[in-house]
Amino acid sequence: MTNEQITYLVFGIVLVLAIIVDLGLFTKKNQTISLKNALYTSIFWIVLGLGFAVFVWFEDGKTYAIEYISAYLMEKSLSIDNIFVFILIFSAFNVKEQFFGRVLFAGVLMAIIFRIIFITVGVALVERFEWILYIFGAFLLYTGVKMFVADEDGEKDPHDYTAYKWIKKVIPMVPHDGNGKYVVRENGKRKYTILFVVVLMLAFIDIVFAVDSIPAVMGISREPMVIYTSNIFAVLGLRSLFFLLRGAADKFDYLQQGIAVVLVFIGLKMLGAHWLNQWISKDQQVVLSLAVIVLCISVSIWYSIHKKKKGVPEEVEDGTIDL
């Protein structure tokens, strides 16, 4: 077996075990995940994701390992932004906390399937039509600028999403959660509950995010192994990350701007690849990408915390907030 085949084999084994253990055995019916459990599980997934980079380093070389780390951090950052939309959807559809785990279980599985499909199609297109990379670059540049100036206060109600309006037209729905069921029978007819609708919404949202994230990771690496593994490892931690961040959604006000700068950087890098390759070696570009990603994400998180501490309203002695 080649080194690449060994890497795929190890990754496949880890992926199957991850789905069985974390998404299967740990997703008990009507289980509420504690913050402590979510923290430990999130740390485990991050350690596992970064630990895979060590394996890639020894098996496939330093360049691929650094590309993997860069792509993984990029995808992980985007997944945090993804989580905030998930939180908004759960709140809008009044999903009970006891059903969070089961809904996320189905949502993460669908996300993995869609990511594999999107990556396969994207890689095939780039291999056949390399000029598509310039379209990806322009798209990332546009997306990054738009994301940077977006007004988060004007967040759209999930009931107004095009996906939800389409779902309402296509499938027969009931306005309740079916006590944890996805499908119920009313008057002898098969109907779908709010929980099923939320699962579909999570899948649609991940497709939207994949449109940004997959071109972005292709701007970091053209190696399919790096693209597949970094994406899937980032997605695997979504469930625990949701439980960890759902009470801290307002603590990362400027993360979006940090991600936007990274997308603009990768977009410019893809558009200027011809000239960049003449001045900077492949290894230097890989290190530069990693440095920019780490710097932008770290600074945006630090600034979010720092700004939030200075910007929160002060409490007066009687416990009310002084406006």
Image (tube, helix red, strand yellow):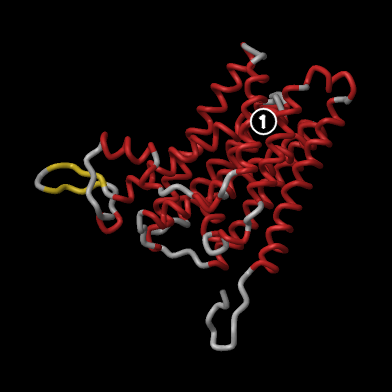
Q: Is residue 168 left or right of residue 58?
A: left
Quarter where residue 286 is shown = top right
| Observer-nearest of 312 and 216 | 312
Q: Is residue 236 left or right of residue 175?
A: right
Q: Is residue 211 left or right of residue 156?
A: right
Q: Is residue 206 above or below residue 320?
A: above
Q: Residue at x 69, y 52 (%)?
A: 47
Q: Quadrant of the N terminus?
A: top right
Q: Residue at x 76, y 43 (%)?
A: 54
| Observer-nearest of 139 and 231 | 139
Residue highlighted by disc 1: 141
x, y percentage for residue 104? Answer: 44, 50
x, y percentage for residue 228? Answer: 61, 32
Residue type at tag 1: Leu
* Element type where label 1 sits in the image: helix
Q: Quadrant of the C terminus?
A: bottom right
